[in-house]
Structure formats: C-alpha cells, structure tokens
Amino acid sequence: MFDFQCTSAPVATAVSTIISLSQSSIADSGTFNIVVPGGTTPLPIFQALAPLDLDWPRWRVYFSDERCLPRDHPDRNDKAAIDIWLRHVPIGYIFSLPAEHGPVEGADQAHHMLSRDQPIFDLVLLGVGADGHVASLFPGRPYGSQSDSPFALAITNAPKPPPERVSLSARCLSATRHMVLIITGREKLFILDDLRGNKDCPANSITARESATVIYPAPTVI
C-alpha cells in the first residue's frame, strides 16, 4: 500500500525524506544504499543535495536504469547525476549499469554483479514517465517481478528514445526497505488512479518491505 503525500513542494519534500532516511540507515547499519532514477525528474533533487554536508562516504548510489550509450555520453543517466551532484561530494560508492556494452551484455553483466553483492537497498527513488514507466520498465512490457527474474533486464525497442537500455528489474528494486515515487508534472497524475486501484503498471510491480510513498504536486490555485 502506498502512502500518498500531496504537497506544493514535491522536490523539497523528496529531499527531506532522502536526508531523513539516510541518517536513520547510517545509524542502523553504517551505510545508506539508495537507487536513483534517470531522466529529468531527479535533476532538481540532485542539485539540492550537492551542496549539503551529509555523511557522503557512507552513501552507496545505484542507478535504476541506463541508456545504451558510451560512457560519458551527455545523454546517459549517470553522466547527468555525476556532473550535477556526485562529482561534488565524497560519495562512497557508485554502481553504474554497464549499458555501453549493449542491452543484452550490459544486463547480463549487471545481473552477475548484483548477484555477487546481493544489496538490500534502503531507498529506491523513482520518477514516473508521461506514459507511466518507472526506471526503464514500460507499461505492457515484462517487469521482471518473478522470484527467478534476473536482477537486470535488457530493454530493446523501448517506446521512447533511445530504444536500447538496461534496467534494474522489479525483483531487484523490490529488495528495498523504502520506496519513494515522485511525480513532478501534473500530466502524470493519472498514475495515482492506477496505484490506488492496484492496476497492472510498472510502479505496482515493485513492493518495498517497510514503506512506499508517492509524492505529488498539489493543485495550482489561481
């Protein structure tokens, strides 16, 4: 079940939640394992985090999905996060998906790396696309939620460019204590009905162990 938080400041609310969970996770286990999304939704969050004085060496950052582009390509998800945020703080660990090897080889390598480490995430932070996709899990496509699914999926012929990607599977993303789904555009609010109705959609294929929160914008008052 999702906890729905309507707010006039979704980004600030998300940042506050991330900080709070990082502090409690580090106090509990000594590390903070966070999955972050790509696209434009998290960029203001990354900008807000960059100047903060947090316990960065204890943070372990994993990317939810990646575009099959060369390392350092300006359109890669990890490139944007590194430029805006991660290069400016003494972050402890970064797990970038090896999508530069193509979707099949990249997903296979990522699966074996994650199988070796078996991380339990403290927070999976996800945005929502205009079509309802999260990470690179698209509606009507396999989400990889079965117990024997690989930890990473090869995405081909994606309905939005670029067509080839590597994504953490729903099985992998569900290995988290907390999930936060942030919606910043009002055109994406249709996903609320899907979540409340438990409809078949990518976000509903991910099940956090302790809490799942949806942060979305309040109506604009004219």
Image (tube, grey):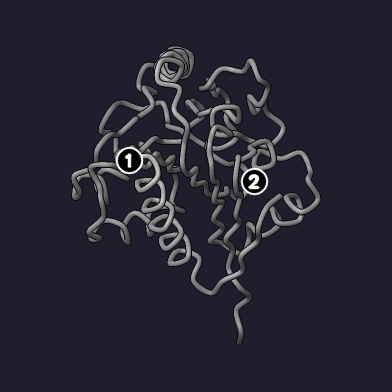
For marks 1 and 2, give the CA distance.
34 Å
Helix, strand or loop for disc 2: loop
Nearer the camera: disc 1 or disc 2: 1
Looking at this rendering, what residue extends furthest in the bottom direction? 222
Where is residue 26? Give x, y as percent: 35, 46
Give 36 or 158, whichever is nearer the viewer.
Answer: 36
Q: Which residue is mark 1?
A: 30
Q: Which residue is mark 2?
A: 132
Please tell me whether residue 217 is drawn above or below residue 178 in the rendered image.
below
Which residue is depicted at the point 22% across and 59% down? 53
Please tell me whether residue 57 is drawn above or below residue 156 in the rendered image.
below
Amino acid, disc 2: Gly
Quick check: 217 left or right of 43? right
For the residues labelled 1 and 2, say whether their Cβ atoms are less than 8 Å apart. Answer: no
Which residue is depicted at the point 34% across and 54% down? 46
Quick check: 11 left or right of 198? left
Quarter-of-image position of residue 30: top left
